[in-house]
Image (tube, coloured by chain):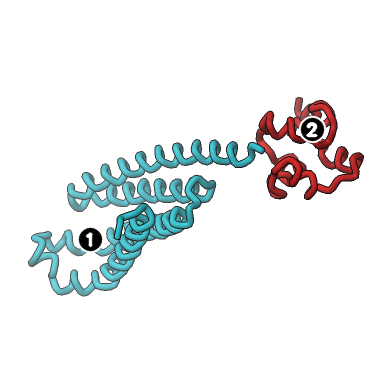
Chain colours: A cyan, B red
Amino acid sequence: MAWSRDHSVLLSIVATRLIAVLALVLALALPWLVADGFFGHRVSIAAEQAVWLMPIYYVFLVPALVALVALDRLLAAVHQEQVFTRSNVLLLRIISWCCFAAGVVLLASSLVSPVFFALAVLAAFFGVILRAMKNLFAAATALQEESDYTI
Amino acid sequence: MSIVIHIDVLLAQRKMSSGELAERIDLTAANLSILKNDKAKAIRFSTLEALCRELQCQPGDLLEYVADSKE
């Protein structure tokens, strides 16, 4: 079976939903993982830092899930061959802001561990890239509308 | 919208239906509706030519510039 754009979009949708499910499963399992000292024994995180993992993760989960839902809707629209539309521009804008929000959460979390600072920079970087993509999509949408309404 | 298109007036004067005009100029009913409702962003010379030919008019009869109230 030849690989096509359609299959690629479907794979992206499956991956997005899988990540969302894993994120939720981890949210449910986190209290047990922290209580059992899972992180302390296996990942070598100090006990006091492990305690902070739960609130950090739950706050981080909010923009992450919003971004994943927006990404799922964006990919579903692309699957239906509705690419350069205003709603997709809005979805990209939402995802971009979610990256910035996640960056803020991670920046605040860098007080617990410096690793989070690097992740915050990464999230902000993704936010900027997505913002640029949003601007490109907005310009392409204007061109598409111009073309569609040229009779 | 500063440019108003008077297809409805000309169709009434020529006693022609929208569907008939769309068929004659090889345009879909949806696209003719976009033109009639002033939603079009641009009009091709070929479309204008076909409209003028079938409605037996000049481009000036079809299009009118109306100054916006802000101007």
Q: Residues within 10 Å of mark 1 (few under 14, many from 20)?
A: some
Mark carried by residue A42? none
The residue drawn where x is 29% and y is 72% is A28
* Quadrant where the image shows the C terminus of chain A: top right
Question: Which amino acid lies under the numbered mark 1 shown in the image of this protein?
Answer: Trp
User: Which residue carries the number 1 mark?
Assistant: A52
**Quick one: SS at disc 1?**
helix
Residue B40 as seen in the image, left or right of residue A44: right
Question: Which amino acid lies under the numbered mark 2 shown in the image of this protein?
Answer: Arg
Query: Residue A26's spot in the image, x, y percent?
Result: 26, 68
Query: Residue A33's spot in the image, x, y percent?
Result: 19, 71
The residue drawn where x is 26% and y is 64% is A54
**Chain name for mark 2:** B
Figure label count? 2
Q: In the rendered view, tell whether residue B71 sits above or below residue A13.
A: above
Dividing the picture into quadrants, the one containing residue B9 is top right
Query: Residue A81's spot in the image, x, y percent?
Result: 48, 53
Mark carried by residue B53? 2
Q: Nearer the viewer, residue A27 or A16?
A: A16
Query: Residue A48's spot in the image, x, y percent?
Result: 16, 61
Q: Nearer the viewer, residue A45 or A27?
A: A27
